[in-house]
Image (cartoon, rainbow, N blue to C red):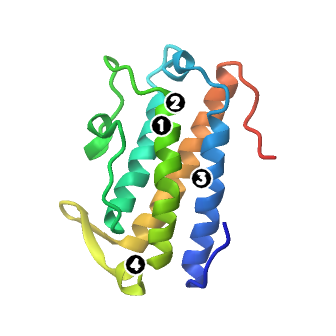
Amino acid sequence: METQAVSPRLNALLDLYDMQTDFFKRALVEISDEDAHKRLDTKANHIAWLAGSLVQQRFELAGMFGVAEQPVANELFKNNQGIRDDISYPSLTVLKDDWKAISPKLREALLKASQEKLDSIFEMMPGFSMTHYELLTFTIYREASCIGQIALWRRLLGYDALKYD
């Protein structure tokens, strides 16, 4: 996607956003739903949870920028819920469909965001505030981290490495 005329600091984040929009899809290529739930006798977050939390994060960010939609698995991930052993998370197809649906809407909302909105402060949790721009920056960082974890899981589960071409 081509970036519209926006501030340089937002433009750089949109470049990363676009990369991670694609990397997310690539990271999940060919992974079975069964393998997506494997934790290999660890307490690590499995692929299904990582992918679902990323989808939830984009929907929540979109909501802060005026896109009022919810992902299919909202009840499993809202309020930053951690992984649960007793849950079968949604299929990767469902999560990829939600990702595909929200990503262009969030991108458009970010392009339309005013400087006032980006600089406005909100309370993230009691006693901790940040600007919407800082949240966007953190979200971009977290996406890269989680996609990297999925890429590692690919290798641990015997899949080919994440392809960037």
**Mark 1 in CB contact with mark 4 (< 8 angstroms):** no
- What residue is disc 3 on? 21
Between circles 2 and 4, the one closer to the viewer is 2
Q: Is residue 17 above or below residue 3?
A: above
Q: Residue at x 33, y 35 (%)?
A: 82
- What residue is disc 1 on? 95
Left or right of 139: which side holds 65? left
Q: Is residue 38 above or below residue 135?
A: above
- What residue is disc 2 on? 92
Q: In the rendering, which numbered label is found on residue 118?
A: 4
Q: In the rendering, which numbered label is found on residue 78?
A: none
For numbered disc 3, what is the local secondary structure? helix
Which amino acid type corresponds to the residue marked 1 in the rendered image? Leu
Spot occupied by residue 125 in the image (x, y as percentages of width and height): 23, 58
> In terms of depth relative to the viewer, which is nearer, 139 or 44?
139
Q: Is residue 65 above or below residue 91?
A: below
Would residue 78 be visible to someone looking at this image?
yes
Between circles 4 and 3, the one closer to the viewer is 3
